[in-house]
Amino acid sequence: MKKSILTLTILGIISALLLSFVYQLTTPLIAERQDQDKKGVVLAVLPESSNYRVVEKNGVTLYEGNKEGEVAMIASGPGFGGTIELIVGANPFLRQIYAVKVLSHSETPGLGSHITGEEFEKNFINKPFGDYQVVKRPAVDPLEVEVITGATVSTEMVVNIVKNAMNQMLVAYGFNPIDVTSAPITTGATDATTGATDTTGSATVTTGATLTTGATDTATSATDTSTGATDTTTSATDTTGSATVTTGATVTTGATDTATSATDTSTGASSAGGGEE
Amino acid sequence: MKFLKIFKNGLWDENPTFRIVIGMCPTLAITNAAINGLVMGLATAFVLLTTEIIISLVKKLIPENVRIPSYVLIIATMVTTVDYFLQAFLPGIASALSLFIPLIVVNCIILGRAEAFASRNSVTDSIADALGMGLGFTWALLLLSSIRELLGSGSIFGYTILGAWYPPMAIMLLPAGAFISLGILIGFMNFISRKGVK
């Protein structure tokens, strides 16, 4: 008995020492690589900038290129198989998107994973800001995005995230956001369905979107009305903080109220599992 | 001579993937591109080699009743080391394999060989066993992932082999494709070995 405890203790100590050594050795390298990767990614979506600085505006982290007006922003939201993270390079003053690149995703290999391909990225190269629509035929209008075969949900989710990022960027620079429509969020993971209906104090706000999240059972929605403003603004944010959903109207990030205590209808309702199409 | 015999055992006679059919989780999950299969195989082989060496060295010091937790501790330490080094030096592959690197800890090939072989045999024999089993796992994953990448994306190691005329079979990249190709490969291996016996 004593020997057993002693053996495990000694082994544990040796293991901890070795791992702390490996950790110290590799952590600076890992951090450096991530920095380099990030730099390359930011500059890849800003056509004329050779450097950038990080600024925080309206709670959003923005990468301002040294070329006037060029701004990049990392945005994320739910996809079909998990969170999709992408970077948008744009000029909010000229209302132009330079490029969109997907940084990480867990979409279906061979289908939804095509959101990373050049073919799909072309949809957002040098395009105006606007209410993009997913179409099931070759895109004619600049604001049309041709659906990826077998991955309608993935396509729609990327478009949602881009539109949302576009508006966040506009708001951050003091412009009025653009009216956009959002596709309902459906993820492949089978989990709880959370109705994004919340009662915050006296103001009752209903968001049109139905949030199906595979991540956690509780997706708290934060909604509110900004009175006096021309538009009714609603935004639903899930607890992971990764997904921001714009519904119906426009977003005013300044006036977002987080209602964590509000009643959440999260029951094991049926959700869209199984095949994507 | 014995060294070679043990080595060949893992490589072919008791190949973990095609003959014993263990370690199926990474085999089915990450073999959608040849590079993933190769790195996963080599990472597992490295962990197997280091843990088998350590365990065969300390086997007399570890009391019988705590041997499993001790082995798991040794394996976990080596896996974490591999995980950090991959993140530092091969970040692209590390992110492609993501969760499956830490999961080498529970790959039954490793604990299985530690318990069945390293805890009972000399260091030299354990090295032979680890190399045989590790490389046996590696070539199996490499073969499976190359087939899947070729049929599913028309390329191997990212180089296009089948041109634009080839419509990629997306199913080969999905889990179903892994089952189908693995089944056919195992059948094929059985066919070859049976022929040898006759």
Image: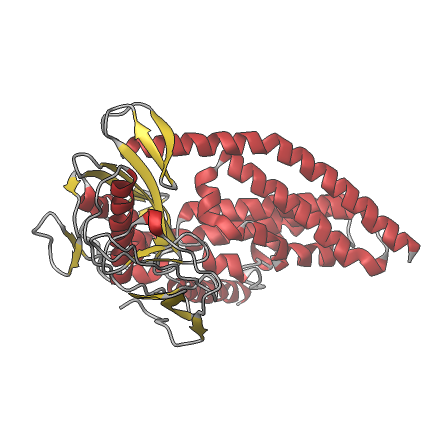
Q: Residue at x 48, y 43 (%)?
A: B94
| Residue A57 image-quadrant placement | top left
Relative to B130, is B158 on the left or the right?
A: left
Of residues A174 and A151, the one nearer the viewer is: A174
Point out residue B17 in the picture as x, y percentages from the top left corner.
Answer: 53, 59
Point out residue A213 in the picture as x, y percentages from the top left corner.
Answer: 40, 64
Q: Residue at x 18, y 46 (%)?
A: A123
Relative to B130, is B24 on the left or the right?
A: left
Q: Look at the picture and state if B68 lies above or below A122.
A: below
Q: Look at the picture and state if A265 lies above or below B92.
A: below
Q: Look at the picture and state if A221 lies above or below A23.
A: below
Looking at the figure, which quarter contains the C terminus of chain A? Answer: bottom left
| Residue A211 image-quadrant placement | bottom left
Q: Is residue B18 visible?
A: no
Of residues A196 and B21, the one nearer the viewer is: A196
Point out residue A195 in the picture as x, y percentages from the top left corner.
Answer: 37, 70
Q: Residue at x 62, y 46 (%)?
A: B79
| Residue A26 image-quadrant placement | top right
Relative to A149, is B102 on the left or the right?
A: right
Point out residue B84 in the picture as x, y percentages from the top left corner.
Answer: 57, 39
Relative to B12, is A92 on the left or the right?
A: left
Looking at the figure, which quarter contains the N terminus of chain A? Answer: bottom right
Of residues A196 and A51, the one nearer the viewer is: A196
Residue furthest right as drawn: A2
Q: Is residue B64 visible?
A: yes
